[in-house]
Amino acid sequence: MVSDASPAPAKNPVTLREVAATAGVSVATASKALNGQGRMTAETRERIRETAQRLGFRPNSLAQSLLRRRSFTVGLLTNDTYGRFSLPVMSGISDALVDKGVSVFLCNVEDDQRLGQLHVDAMLDKRVDGIIATGKRIDRHLPVDLSNLGVPVIYAFTQPDPGAIAFVSDDAGGARLAVEHFWRLGRRIAHVSGPASFAVVHARAQAYRDVLTEKGLPVMEPLLGSWSEAWGHEAVKTLFDGRLSKRGGETPDAVFCGNDQIARGVIDALRERGLGVPGDVGVIGFDNWQIVAEATRPPLTSVDMNLAALGREAGLTLLSLVGGEPAEPGIRKLPCRLVVRQSCGRPPDG
């Protein structure tokens, strides 16, 4: 049976004129109130805004863009396919921009220069107010040229162009937090990290050496391998099978790891040897990847790079540039924090 009922007619959008009439003001006054402009009492401005919200008024975004010469959109480029680092950064950027009426859209360029250029061209065609570039490591540039685009560009957790503005985590400072925590516990500390081709590996390893040297403690040469649980598992064999004559001599009772996956492998290997964590050996990771850190047994203490805060600072700085405010070029290092769980023990004053 075929129904004769016709679909309900689409409801026409609420106009600015309707908002003004309902609020009892002129169209010009309503427009100024909703755009945060003009001189009027706070009570009048609030009444107009409440009326617009109650009626479901939505400003014409195209007209707003033409009026202010802005699109109120920001492009985010990344080659972090899995979103391990870019998603927390994007969360911080969105948090900074949402209250300003600015939308963020993410494009994954992978490691493909052609794909990266296509995304950049599309962003420019859409008249984005600016671009934020982020990645999966701070010592590699995205595979696309972001210089001389005609819009502000900010780098966050990726290698910047010379003279650009960039935000990165203070890896050396984060490593110091971990090593100093173990030092306060009176532990003999080893360091197991990732590939030597990563700049952060050397920054964290040097901070480890510096702290132990400052405290007058023996330094075991860091063990470098892959960013994997398997490498953490293998490193325990080197640390606990008597092959330490060139690494400081004594068996460690604390292991500071270059990431959380390595730390998880270390903990599994220690458990297989009948060693308790943190009773016999304390373990600290890096990244504070919650799905790994909280699922580890015991839950893993880890250095958090504060990527959401980093993204927020990048977003706010981009807004300032879009608004015409100057900003000093250079790399800003943001502090890390140590998230203490059950894998490392607490110092007497902690």
Image (tube, grey):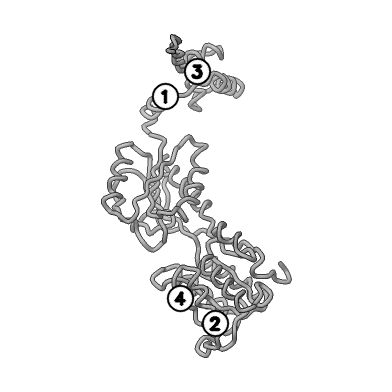
Query: Label 3, on which residue?
Result: 29
Q: Earlier in the sequence, mark 3 or mark 4?
A: 3
Query: Measured along the vertical axis of the image, is residue 268 above or below residue 121?
Result: below
Left or right relative to 171: residue 80: left
| Quadrant in the rendering for residue 12 | top left
266 relative to 56, above or below: below
Q: Position of residue 102 (x, y in %)?
A: 45, 37
Residue 216 against residue 194 in the figure, above or below: below
Residue depicted at x 46% and y 46%: 315
Q: Which residue is mark 1?
A: 60
The alpha-carbon separation of the residues under discs 1 and 3 comes to 17 Å
Q: Amino acid at mark 2?
A: Leu
Q: CA distance from mark 3 to mark 4?
A: 66 Å
Query: Label for residue 224?
Result: 4
Dot placed on the residue nearer the N-terminal end, 2 or 1:
1
Which residue, as the protein is rendered here, is positioned at the far bottom?
245
User: Mark 1 packing: few (<14 Cα in 10 Å), some, or many (20+)?
Assistant: few
Q: CA distance from mark 4 to mark 2?
A: 12 Å
| Three-letter amino acid code at the position of disc 1 | Asn
Q: Could you tell me which residue is drawn at 42 percent across and 55 percent down? A: 166
Q: Is residue 110 left or right of residue 1?
A: left
